[in-house]
Image (spheres, coloured by chain):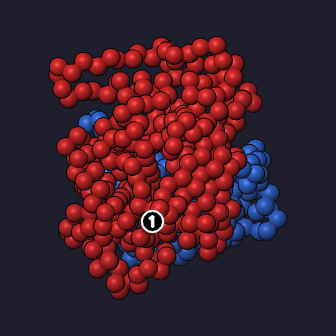
Amino acid sequence: MNLFWQRFKRNRLAVTGGIMVLALFFAGALAPVVSPFNPNDIDRKHILEPPGISHPLGTDDLGRDVLSRMLYGSRISLSVGFIAVGIATVIGVIIGAVSGYYGRWTDRIIMRVIDIMLSIPTFFLILAVIAFVGPSIWNIMIIIGLTSWMGVARLVRAEFLSLKEREFVLAAKALGASNMRIIFKHIMINSMAPVFVSAVLGVASAILVESALSFLGLGVQPPTPSWGNILTLGKDNIEIAWWLSVFPGLAILITVLVYNLVGEGLRDALDPRLWGSKG
Amino acid sequence: MKELLKVHGVKKYFKVKGNNLLKAVDDVSFSVNKAQIFGLVGESGCGKSTLARLILRLMEPTGGEIFFDNIDVINAQGKALSEIRRSLQIVFQDPLAALNPRRSVIDAVGEALLINKIARKKELKDRVVYLLQRVGLDADALYKYPHEFSGGQRQRICIARALSVNPKLIVADEPLSALDVSIQAQILNLLEELQRSSNLAYIFITHNLHVIEHFSDVVAVMYLGKIVEMSGTEELFQKPFHPYTEALLSAMPEPEIDKKSRRIILEGDVPSPVYIPAGCPFHPRCHKRFEPCDTIVPAYREAEKDRWVSCHLWS
């Protein structure tokens, strides 16, 4: 663990990313406290005002404060990111563990199912399902979760395939440990590092999918603010109100970037092949 | 003497590329008595470790029978299987690989006590401390992790873990090979002491002939998945029957400088276990081969009392 911190700290970009991730997290958590306005307060006297002193990021076509809406919107983005990734990780870990541990035909069937899932363009599948079940934040989380577990499953399967032949697993088996015990207490805890990394990277892509859906009007429904639907307003008013497109766009860009930086930093710090080198 | 383990005609074949069979263990039979030390020697890749895994039922054999204390090891289920798990234990070559890097010593050594309901949660700590003391470790070790120990200490933890279920037979799969020479002696003494105090039987797998000579009661020599010679240790070292054993013994470093030893240099390398030579598998490298060797497989037979060998010279 110490070694891991030392390695992580050496990566400046990842540390910066980590600080940004924490900042974004607190901004969302403290949105009701730090927002200058109520995000849904309509102010007809200040429609489409450019960024200024009273409205640091301007106002939208209904006179709502963009900064406040973006702070509340970050709650949506982050919760969609985390819950969708949580669902995907749980499914992926269980399926990958079963596939890798039991092997043989179980493994073959599961791997073919994963191949089929991967061959379907995920975004269009999500669009189709949302059109069918109706857009809501919970539906989005669940659907993103249900369509993005395959990478984790493959990762966990590969870890299980190599770990189950290791001598400490054989020793546990020789001591009479049950399959469940071997899976959870011996193999799982040794295969969590790459899963953790892929979950962090997954948050970024889930946020991106949610923004895209909201942008298309199939995600979080107005008046609930989300980065995606602020962008939609920006598109409608792009010639007169640049701030409606630029700030949510930047927010999405920066969020995705910092999660990727942290994820890559974690990956490098956790990779035992790099532990020996001083680099 | 009471027979503890009986291995009869055990085979393990692996399918490899091109539908060939790799005969890792081929028709091996032997038995181990109570409190006996059974040495198993052979070159790398001759099937020693596979045989160890088969005996512990960590792998399913292709054929043959294994009985432990009259329990059918290969088909054991439920209660019989957990009986085997408690009576048969293994110590591996590399103690770092044999310990879960993310579990502390009390978890590693205590695990089997909890699984087999030998100790309750409350008494666990005392039992683990007792086991650690038996292998020469302090109670400080309890909450440490494997990477915090030296190689010798790790091997002691592995031995404590194997002892936790009070086994009757421990398969030691090259337990010294990963250790420094000075530590090897300590671990060997520990194993010897435990054998005396607990009436343990060992199957001791190694390629260190000095250790075998000093340590074991019976020696079996394996070559390409088969036992080519098996006999009492003293007899075998005095007069090896099989030319392969002879060559192995001649390769032992002699501690006396002046003593003249005739070194038998084997020709060629060990053939691949996928393409085992016809006739006697050893004949292409044998310095005593004659007509039948390259066509007829020699029978494995008792050439003298308690001396088994498979060689045409002795049939």
Q: In this view, does B191 lie to the left or right of B301?
A: left
Rendered view: B99 above or below B221: below
Q: Which residue lies furthest to the left in this view?
A: B257
In the orientation shown, which residue stands out farthest toward the right? A132
Residue at 53% of width from left, 66% of height from top?
Answer: B85
Residue drawn at the location 77% of the way across and 68% of the way down: A134
Task: Report the chain shown in red.
Answer: B
Closest to the observer, A93 or A124: A93
Residue B79: image location, x then y, percent? 61, 75
Q: How far across and down, in percent of the image, does residue A234 sit?
A: 59, 54
Badge 1 amino acid: Lys
At horizontal 35% and vertical 86% (from top left) the residue drawn is: B122
Q: Which chain carries label 1?
A: B
Residue pointed to by mark 1: B168
Residue A115 visible somewhere in the drawing? yes
Q: In which quarter of the image is the C terminus of chain B?
A: top right
Residue A143 as seen in the image, left or right of residue B101: right
Give the x, y percent position of residue B65: 66, 54
As helix, strand or loop, the secondary structure at mark 1 comes to loop
- Hue used for the chain lettered A: blue
Residue A165 seen from this side? no
Q: What is the quadrant of residue B301 in the picture?
A: top right
Give residue A81's position: percent from left, percent from top. Answer: 55, 61
